[in-house]
Each structure stands twice: as structure tokens, then as C-alpha cells.
Amino acid sequence: MLSFSLRRILSAVLVLFAISIAVFLIFFATPGVDPAARIAGRSASPATLAHVRAAFGLNRPIFIRYLLMMDHLFIKRDLTSYVNVGLKVVPQVLKAAPITLALVSGAAVIWLVVGIFGGIIAAANRGKFIDPLVMFIGIAAVSVPAYWLGEVVNLITQSRLHSSLFSWVPSGGYTPFTQNPWQWALHLLFPWLTLAALYAGIYARVLRAELVNAMNEDYVRTARAKGLSERRILIRHALRCSLVSIVSLFGLDFGALIGGAALLTEVVFGLQGVGMLTYTALQNLDLPVIMACVLYGSFFVVLANAVVDILYAFLDPRVRVA
Amino acid sequence: MPDSPILSVQDLQVTFATRQGPLRAVDGLSFDVAPKEVVGIVGESGSGKSVSMYSVLGLVRDANVQINGSVKFQGREILGLSDQEMQPIRGGEIGMIFQDPMTALTPVYTVGWQIAEQLRAHSGMTKQQARERAIELLGEVGIPDPRKRVDRYPHEFSGGMRQRVVIAMALSCNPKLLIADEPTTALDVTTQAQILDLMLKLQDSYNSSIVIITHDMGVIAEMAHKVVVMYAGRPAEIGPEIDVVRNPRHPYTWGLLGAVPRVESRNDRLTTIPGNAVSPLDIPEGCAFADRCEYRMDICTKRPQLKGTNSHLDACWLSDEQRLTIRSKAVR
Amino acid sequence: MGALGVLIFIVLICLCAPLYAHYWAHVNPFSSNISGRIFINGHWRSVIQSNSTGYGESPIGPTWHINNYFLGADSQGRDVFARLLYGGRDSLLIGTASALICVFFATISGLAAGYFGGVIDWIVSRMLDITWAFPVYLLAISLSVILVTAGFSVGPIHVQAGSLLLPIIIIALIYVPYVARPLRGIVMTLKEREFIQAAIGSGASDWRILRKEILPNVAPSIIVFFPLMVAFNMLTESALSFLGVGVQPPNASWGTIINDGLELLYTRPWVAMAPGLMIVITAGALNLLGDGFRDAFDPKAKLRGSI
């Protein structure tokens, strides 16, 4: 188990290394454009350009450039935005991270509960009308663009029904948990629901498919022949075995969302998370910030991948020996 | 009635509605199982032998299935009971052993947990008691070092050892009846013999009846007191083991027995039954075996009824004289 | 079946937009029409009107007249309904074209990795792993930021900035691992099957085996994946366009129209609502179609977990 975890972490570090190279290449070695102009932003003065060239060693060999970049990012942590002059990038990311974390964790709780519940209900009622109904809602949920759903929610809660039904909904933004937990939850409630809708749909569909497969397995027949209740067979046997794939899916999605995939929800609801940071940087073409955000995001995805694999081994005893 | 049967199956019919029309998996199966009796159901794959026994326990989960007839367990009708009503019977009164021990156990729980789960479902045992009993049971089915093995996962056992676990589980609640669905088919030859020995030994100490489903006449000869030969969902021949094996009456049984390699036989070549098993979707009106039968007659387009003397019944139009001639020719 | 009907209907009305849209809109849906006036219900009305508060101005709302600003105007005074139809062309084009390219590359890499194994498998799998490890949207965004605004030129290939090709290629590439990974798995199990082993044993060339034996057997899965990928890609395109790094003006897609409508959300919600509804309906129909294909062709096909 320990050696398995170690091997997994080592490979994660290797993948991260490869990703940092890939990101570096995307931003600094795409043919056609002068990277100094990109870093310095639009309409930068020749002095700034010269400064950028020196700081990132743009006239030196490519691997030196790579090392310099990593040095700015991880060791000196002094990568600076040239668009918003003087803004240090790394602290910005670290400041935005808790907001993203709060958004994604809350949504994750909702979508896990709703998705797993929906999947179980659908699988347990196969052949009755409730199964296709749940699946149809699931399809609808996965077909809605999250940012658009956020706009619909805003339209209803902030404008159309704001004076009546939803007068209690705060007008966007974020209140830190430490400041006022109630307001924190209130501000995040609709972003949570919006973000959770898509994933709840996916998870309900995935889990239903897994459960239906599992209920045809021999071990379910054995469990039934043992005289267990249908509920116990579904929950303790079929669900327990299907959970393995749900957990691996969850790890990947959670990692990706923490890593910035929640950016659309953040933008729509005005939450100053990592996604919003990326978005603002995009609007200004602020390359150092975008790059830092992408690397930050990849870090969480790779981390999540590794955690998932290790969790997998805990959940499925067959993997442990392999 | 000196020995009222433990299990009495009367005119069991199992039909699946399919896109190609109704599929008769079991058609008119009747037999009794007396206390402590071992009944063997034999037939090729697809002959409806497994389906019939799954129907008895209500384990056929297809939404398009129609089950008719009567199944009485200790005098009580159990066909058509709800899952909830069946729960105390399944595992408690009737234990079941499955063909493939590799997939029959839930992979994510230890074997001890799975045995204890069944014990706790049928008795008021505490976790600790159930665990102790599981260890005892593992010992009884011949698993070495059961105290250590009880916390192992199914994938850490070999096929034979897993089948022992399944047997331990099936026996855990002292069932009156044990249904074994091809319990040795998935195992290698040496293990097969061990498992059969184990089942006989346990049957003795647990006083349970056994219904064993197999396609192997050798298993029948070793275990069964009574044999039901099935073809295409219909019983072809029923009788005491000694009669059916020594004095088989139905041409299909002849074929099955011929298909068993015998050491004392002078014939080096294995006789086989010509043709393939009939598709359950188009079973002929008359005798289902007619198409593959060497001794087919005109009358075989009509369905023969089970008939015979004493307890040895068969469904074939051949007269006793015809059979005698055929069999005397066969013995060269 | 219903899903297929809806889909065909949407594709038809969008594809044929150039044939009839100007009869409805009377204006070019791509150029601004701020001072335009339309005749509606017996009155001449400006497309952009001053607000009743006296501050600022807002475009006309839905008239519900099919041939006259059916869904109202956007802040440039353009007919939203006409833009919706033209935008649908681009959305559908990008979704379909990128799905085709994606499935093409995924099939090649999945087949090569699964069939040849060894070094090829190692290289392809590592490349897929790395692409997989990127947060999808961030990868798309970084590529788009670099490419969409500046264009792209390698040797003889020169793609102009703002070209529709860029989002197509970017979206196609980022989803390759999603399709290639399951295909690789399918091919690896196929390769162990008797008929493939027999073909290998009989000395058939790799190319022939891939073409004649493997491809027909992975085709059902590809057919199942395709509509799902189109839906996936359309949603991604709309998100990128919404962020301003997808389709570039003067082209429109449903995503860019939602973006246009963002500032008008509380006053003229239809500008943003209508294209969103179109996306939901189209993607929903595609997903239902995928489900139908799965039931018909390959009940075991799995894309990303089990979808």
C-alpha cells in the first residue's frame, strides 16, 4: 500500500513536470509571436519590453528560459503582472484559492447527495416511470451551459422575482466564512446550486448505469440467495461496488474544478476566485497571470488524480496487490 | 405418507417473452425431493435446468418472465411469494451454491464478513458470534487456518477455496435444502472430486437434502439418489439413480451416458449426441428430441407424456420391445 | 426518435438561414443598426430607444413578429433572431467539425496504442495522460489566448486570427484523450480475441487487420461517442465564446450572443436566454441521441466514467 502510494506520487510529480514544460511551450514557444510582447501586454513601452527580455532571458537558450520561468514562479515567487503594474502573481492566486475552494466544496456536497440519491432512485425503480424521469432530468442538467444557468438564476433571483420571492438573496460577491458564516452560505447558495446541477446530472446517470450493471452481477444473485433485503442488496452490495467508479470520477471533477474549471460560475456570480482571476487576466491578456493560473490548476488536477488512485486502492481490495 | 417431501415441484413452466416470441425455458417439470435425498438434474446447457431451480427461489429477475405451476417447500406454496416473504426461506431454509465461485462473492468484502452477513440476516447473532461461527464454518469446509483466512478478500482465494467459502455460506444457517448449480464445472478436475466429497460429507452431518444441477453424468452417478434428465426445458426421464444409469430408457439419456468416457469401455471413441441442442425459441410441437434422435418414428410429431413403471418414468414413444431390441444390438 | 427530429429541425433552420433570414430581419445581422427604425403594429419605432428613466438607452424588446425583430435587438441594434440562426450555424459547425477531427485523431491514437502496444502505446498514453491532466477549460483558454487573437502559422500552414478553424482545432484536440482512452481499452481487449489472433497468425498485414478487423469492431463505440462529443464540444465552444476566446466578431455563435446579452440581462433577457435555450435543446437532443445509439449499437460503450 505504501509503496503503491509512493509510486503514484512519483508519477504525479513527473506528470507535473511535463505539464510545466507544456505550459511553458504554449506560452513561450508558439511560433509567430514575440513572447516579450505577450508578457508585457498590449501597448507596452520599449523599456518594459527590454526589461521583460532580460528578466525572462528571452534571448537565451530555451531550457534556460524554462528554468528562469520556473524560478520566478516557484522559488522567488516574484512573477509580476505587467498589465496591472507591480501586482505579484503568486500571492494573487493564493488569495483567490479559498473562495474557489468554498464554492467547489459546497457544490460537491450538493451534487454528491443529489446525484447519488437520484442514481439510486432511478436504479431501484427500473421499469417504472420514475427511472426515465430522473434520467431525463439528468440529460437536461448535462445539456445546460453552466454559465447560462447562472445567468438564468441571476435573472430570476436578482431581477424578476427579487422584490418578492427572492428578496433575501444577496447581490453577488463573497463574504468570508470567518466574517459571517450565515452570509457566507447565503452568498454561495445559488452559485453552489448552479455549479452542482451539471455534476448532479452526470453522477446520477453514471451511478444508475453502474448500479444497473452491478445488479446483474453474480454476487448480487448470491446476496439475494442469502436472503438479504432488496434494500440491503442495493446499498451494501451493488452501491458499494459501484462507488469505486463514482469516487474516481469525483476526484477528477473536484480537482478540475478547484483547478479553475469553476471559472464560468465564478464569473457569472462575481466570485473573486481563481477562475475569476484567470478571466480578468484573459480580458487584459495578462499572460503571467494566466500562466500561473493554468499551472495552479494543473497542480490540483494531477494531485486529484493521484489521490483518486490511492483511494481506489482503499476501496477496491483487488487493486492493492497489483 | 412416511416421508413427506421437502420440496415438491409440480408442472413448473417458465416462459420468457422475447422479441422473437415466447421462449419456453422450462415446460412441465415435476419432481419431489425427500428429506436427506440427493436429486440430480442433468441436461445439456440451455436445457432449463438452472432456470428451473432459480425460479424455485424467485431468483429469475427478468421483467418478461412468466412462471406457472406449483412449488411447495415443506408443504407450503412458495411460488409467487414476494421478495420480502422469500427472505427467510432464501439462505435460511434453502441454501444455494453457484457455478462460478470467481464471481459469486462480492469482491469488496472479506469472506468472513459475507458469511457473517448471512448469519446475522437469519438469526439474532451478534457480530462477534457471527464471526466466530464463520470461522467454525470455514474450518468445516476444509479451509486451512480459518482464523486468519476469515479476514481475507475473495480474490485472495483459489477457485476451489472460494467454492468452499460459498458452500460454507450456503450451509451457515442449517438449511433443509441445498441447491447446487453446477458446483464443480468451473473447477479443475482434482478440485472437483474434493468439492463433491465435501458436499456429501456435509450433507451427512447437516441432514439436508440436495438438488444438484449438472451436465456431467459422472457427478450424478457419484452423488444422486434420484435423477431428472431434462431436454429443451422438458423432463425426458426421471427415476432412481441406479435405474436411470444402469437401465436408461430415453434415447437422450443413452446419448448422455454414451458421452461419459468410461474406463472399462472397449470403445475408444467417445460417442456423442449428433446435432446441436434445439433452440428454445422453436421447440417442436412433438418430442423435442426428435430431430436428433436416431430412432425417430412418425408418431414423434406428437408430444410424448412421462410414463413408466414404479418411480422410473420417461417421455418417449418407443415401446418396451423396441427398446430391448435397440439395446441388445448396441451391446456388441 | 423525437430527439432526432428536433435535431434535424434545428440544423435545417440554422443551415438555411442565409436563404430566408434577410426576409425576416431586413437588416444584416452582422452590422450594427443603431439608428434603424422598424414599422410595427402601425407605428414606426426606433430599434434603440432612450430609457424611460432618461439615462442611457436600451434596444427594442421582443416584438413577437417573426419578420421584424422577433426577439428584439441587441445593444448594436441587430436582430437577435437572425443572429440566433446565423450563430447556430457556427455553433453547429464548430461542434460537428471539432467532434469529427477529435474522433479522427482519437481513433488513430487509440488504435495505434491499443494494437501495437510497446513503445507506441507508451508514447501515446503519456501524451494522453498529460493532456488529460490539464483542466480542460484552462487548456482550451491558454491555447485560445495565444492562437485566436494572433493567428497561427507554421511553415506553409497559415491560419488567420479570428478564423473559425482555431476554436475547431483547439476543441478537437483537448478532447482527444476522452475518446482515445476508452478506444485504446477496447482495442486491447479485441486484440486478445481469437479472430484477431487468427488474422495475425495467418500473416495478414497490420494495416489490413486494423482496417478489416479492428475498425469495424470499434465502430459501434465511435458511433455512440460521436453525438455525445458534438454536444460536449458545442458546450465548450459556447463557454469559450462566452469568455471571449472562442468565435471572434464579426462571426457569431450562440456563446457570443449570450455574452452580448450579459449586459442586457435584466432589461432585455431574451438576448441571452434565447441562445441558451437553443444550446440546451440541441445538446439535450444530441445526448438523447447518444443514449439511443448506445442502446442500439453498443450498450457497454463508456465515455468518461460511464456516460
Image (cartoon, coloured by chain):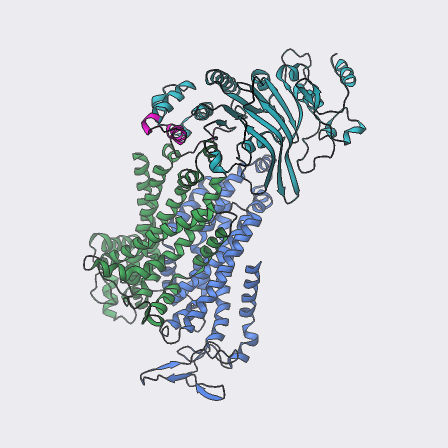
Q: What shade has chain C been given?
A: blue
Which quadrant holds residue A11?
top left
**Segment tinted magenta in the rendering:** B101-129
Give the chain ID for the cyan colour. B
**Observer able to see residue C161:** no
* Left/right of residue A39 with respect to residue B89 in the rendered view: left
Which quadrant holds residue A238?
top left
Pick the residue in front: C161 or C35.
C35
Residue located at (63% from left, 43% from top): B18
x, y percent for residue A157? 34, 67
B121 drawn magenta: yes
**Observer able to see residue B47:** yes
Give the chain ID for the green colour. A
* Left/right of residue B228 with respect to residue A89 in the rendered view: right
x, y percent for residue C292? 55, 53
Outermost residue on the left side: it is A179
